[in-house]
Image: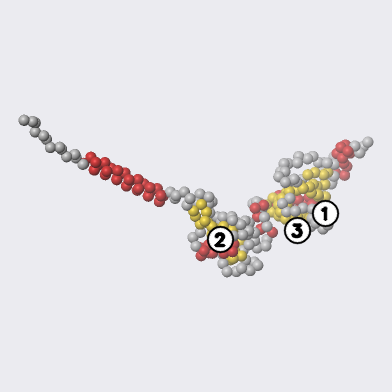
C-alpha cells in the first residue's frame, strides 16, 4: 500500500494582512505629516496683498477719504492693492485687509518722505505723519531725508551768475571761502587772511537769489558770524567728493611768495 496522501495545508493569510495594514498605516501617517506641514509652512509661490503707491507722491501731499482738491489727494488715487510673492514682500509691509481699514489709517496723513510709484507702504511708515505734525508747504518737506536730526536750514545770498540764473542748484555741495581782517595774532599786514571754513555743505534749495543750506546749529552760528564780519565766497564740489580740503590760510605774504610778486 502506498503511504496516505496528506491534504495540502492552507496557507495562512495573517502575514499578508499585517503587511497590508502596515502599508496603509504608513500612507496614513505620511498624509497626516503633509497636512500638518502644509498648514504651518505656506507652499512656495504663495502671495500676499500689499499696498503700493499708485503714482509718485511728493512730500507735502495730504491724504483724504473724501476731499480731492488741490490741497488733498484721495487715498484711493494715491495707493492701490497689489499681489506680491510672500518671499518678495518686505517683512514690515502693510498687508491689505480692507479699504475701510486703509482709509482709517491714512486719512488726514501728510507725506513727509516721497513715495515713488510702486513703492510698498510699510507698517508705521516714517514717510507719513499726522497733518498736525508737519506744515503743508513747508520748506522742510522738500527734501526731508536731507535734514538729519540736529540740523537747520540757513539762508545764504547768492550773486547773479549772469542771465538772471543763480549759481547753484538744489543738491550741490559747496565749501565756504572767507576773508577775515583785523585778526588777532595775524602775521599779515592789516591782519587779513583767507581760508576754507565750513566744508561739504548741502544746498537744500535755491529760491530766487538765495540758497538754503543744511548746517548744524553750531555751524549756522559760525556762518552768521563769518557773513557779518568777513567777505564770503563759495566753491562747488564735484559730486561724491567728500574729502576734507586740508588747506592752509592765505595772506599777503603767501601771495607774494607763491606768485613772486617780490621779483
The residue at 82%/55% (across/down) is: 160
Q: Which mark is residue 51?
A: none
User: Is residue 222 visible from the viewing direction of this image?
Assistant: no
Q: Give the quarter of the image for residue 15.
A: top left
Is residue 36 rendered to the left or right of residue 93? left
Closer to viewer: mark 3 or mark 1:
1
Nearer the N terminus, badge 2 or badge 3?
Answer: 2
In which quadrant of the rendered image does the N terminus lie? top left
Determine the secondary structure under disc 2.
Answer: strand
Q: Position of residue 175 (x, y in %)?
A: 76, 47
Q: Position of residue 108 (x, y in %)?
A: 58, 64
Q: CA distance from mark 2 to mark 1?
A: 46 Å
Q: Which residue is mark 2?
A: 80
Q: CA distance from mark 2 to mark 3?
A: 35 Å
Q: Is residue 23 above or below residue 153?
A: above
Viewer-proximal residue, 215 or 44?
44
Closer to viewer: mark 2 or mark 3:
2
Q: Which residue is mark 3?
A: 207
The residue at 82%/47% (across/down) is: 179
**Mark 2 Cα-neighbour bin, 10 Å: few <14, some 14–19, many ≥20:** some
Q: Give the quarter of the image for residue 136.
A: bottom right
Q: CA distance from mark 3 to mark 1?
A: 14 Å
Nearer the N terminus, badge 3 or badge 1?
Answer: 1
Nearer the N terminus, badge 2 or badge 1?
Answer: 2
The residue at 50%/51% (across/down) is: 86
**Mark 3 Cα-neighbour bin, 10 Å: few <14, some 14–19, many ≥20:** few
Is residue 40 rendered to the left or right of residue 8? right
How many discs appear?
3
Q: Which residue is mark 1?
A: 161
Amino acid at each position: 500500500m502506498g503511504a496516505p496522501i496528506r491534504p495540502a495545508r492552507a496557507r495562512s493569510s495573517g502575514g499578508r494582512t499585517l503587511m497590508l495594514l502596515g502599508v496603509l498605516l504608513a500612507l496614513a501617517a505620511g498624509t497626516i505629516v503633509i497636512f500638518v506641514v502644509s498648514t504651518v509652512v505656506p507652499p512656495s509661490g504663495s502671495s500676499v496683498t500689499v499696498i503700493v503707491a499708485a503714482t509718485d507722491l511728493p512730500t507735502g501731499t495730504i491724504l483724504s477719504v473724501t476731499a480731492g482738491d488741490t490741497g488733498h489727494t484721495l487715498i484711493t488715487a494715491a495707493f492701490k492693492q497689489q499681489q506680491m510673492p510672500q518671499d518678495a514682500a518686505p517683512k514690515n509691509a502693510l498687508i491689505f485687509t480692507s479699504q475701510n481699514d486703509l482709509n482709517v489709517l491714512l486719512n488726514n496723513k501728510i507725506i513727509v518722505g516721497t513715495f515713488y510709484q510702486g513703492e510698498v507702504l510699510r507698517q508705521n511708515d516714517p514717510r507719513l505723519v499726522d497733518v498736525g505734525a508737519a506744515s503743508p508747504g513747508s520748506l522742510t518737506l522738500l527734501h526731508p531725508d536731507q535734514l538729519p536730526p540736529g540740523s537747520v536750514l540757513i539762508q545764504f545770498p547768492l550773486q547773479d551768475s549772469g542771465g538772471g540764473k543763480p549759481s547753484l542748484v538744489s543738491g550741490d555741495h559747496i565749501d565756504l571761502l572767507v576773508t577775515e581782517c583785523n585778526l588777532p595774532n595775524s602775521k599779515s599786514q592789516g591782519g587779513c587772511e583767507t581760508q576754507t571754513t565750513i566744508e561739504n555743505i548741502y544746498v537744500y534749495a535755491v529760491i530766487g537769489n538765495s540758497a538754503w543750506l543744511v548746517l548744524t546749529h553750531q555751524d549756522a552760528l559760525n556762518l552768521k558770524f563769518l557773513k557779518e564780519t568777513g567777505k564770503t565766497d563759495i566753491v562747488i564740489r564735484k559730486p561724491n567728493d567728500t574729502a576734507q580740503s586740508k588747506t592752509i590760510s592765505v595772506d599777503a605774504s603767501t601771495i607774494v611768495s607763491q606768485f613772486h610778486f617780490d621779483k
